[in-house]
Image (cartoon, helix red, strand yellow):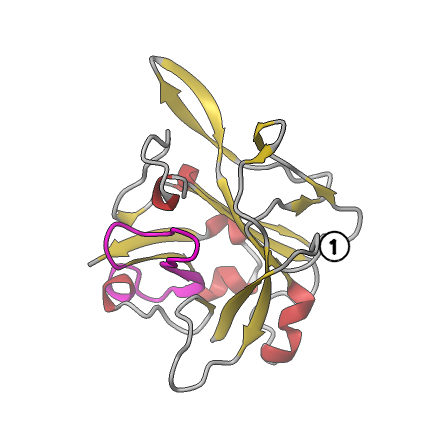
Amino acid sequence: MITIKTVPSEDVLYGQSKWWGFPDLPDDLDWPTAQAEDEGETFEDPLTFICQIRCSDLAALDPEGLLPHEGMLYFFAALDYFLGDLDAFLTPGMGEWPSEYFRVLYSPTCEGLNTHTLMYDEDTPAALPPEAIQFVIPSEAKESFTWLLGESYLEEVREAMPGLVPLLQIDENDDWGLRFFDCGMLTFMISPADLAARRFDRVRAHLYSA
């Protein structure tokens, strides 16, 4: 288990591990979208960028090599509603999410990245301010329930997805205004075999709220 802590930063954080902000993507990866509908018209709605993880930052904390130690992992999901936008076009509910509501991307390189931006208007970023990520091995008294690997904190998720491990577990956070209904967590789950094969296209996502 590798705990994630975030720290507000005034730095650009280009090509670094960061939470929120805008993703730095290589040429062969696009910002993922999901089909949404509004007033009878369908369109592609960008998924919320959650974080990018520079895999070299994990190497010292992952001696078994469960995760890649090169390149970048990117996590996107339909989180606008859970960040307070009650009129969000995409509002997935409890349980396992359909695959269109989330995406995990992997780039084997951190070279030649392009920052993709999304704006409400010319002056208003459609994203929370980026925060730098710190990765730590947790103590017995867990300070954060947002983590990589290990096992899901929630028994309900373990029972719903037996044999899978949390690639990323995301807890609610008042500083971000992130609430999963009432005391919930969103977990990106993957089988050990798919993790070993780097098949991040086979990740599944589960939302549980008490």
Label 1 Cα neighbours within 10 Å, binned few <14 / some 14-19 / many ≥20: some
Membership of 127 in magenta stretch: no
Specify whether residue 181 is painted magenta.
Answer: yes
| Residue at 30% in and 60% down | 161
Mark 1 is on which residue type?
A: Cys
Give the x, y percent position of residue 184.
28, 57
Q: From which residue to which does the magenta span run?
A: 158-183
* Residue for point 65% across, 40% down: 29
Q: Main secondary structure of the magenta part?
A: loop
9, 199: nearer the viewer = 9
Q: Nearer the viewer, residue 123 or 204?
A: 123
Q: Is residue 22 left or right of residue 110?
A: left
Residue 145 percent across, percent down from the top left: 39, 69
Image position, residue 183 (x, y; %):
26, 59
The outermost residue toward the bottom is 140
Left-right relation of 138 to 129? left
Against 180, residue 40 (above or below) is: above
**Number of numbered discs overlaid on the protein picture:** 1
> Where residue 63 sits: x, y (%)?
61, 80
Instruction: Look at 35% across and 67% down and name the residue there.
Output: 163
Among the 4 quarters of the image, the one containing residue 185: bottom left
Q: Where's the C terminus, which quadrant?
A: bottom left
The quarter of the picture where residue 11 lies is bottom right
Q: Residue at label 1? A: 110
Relative horizontal placement of residue 163, taking residue 103 as reference (left or right)? left
Q: Is residue 47 depicted above or below 20 in this figure?
A: above
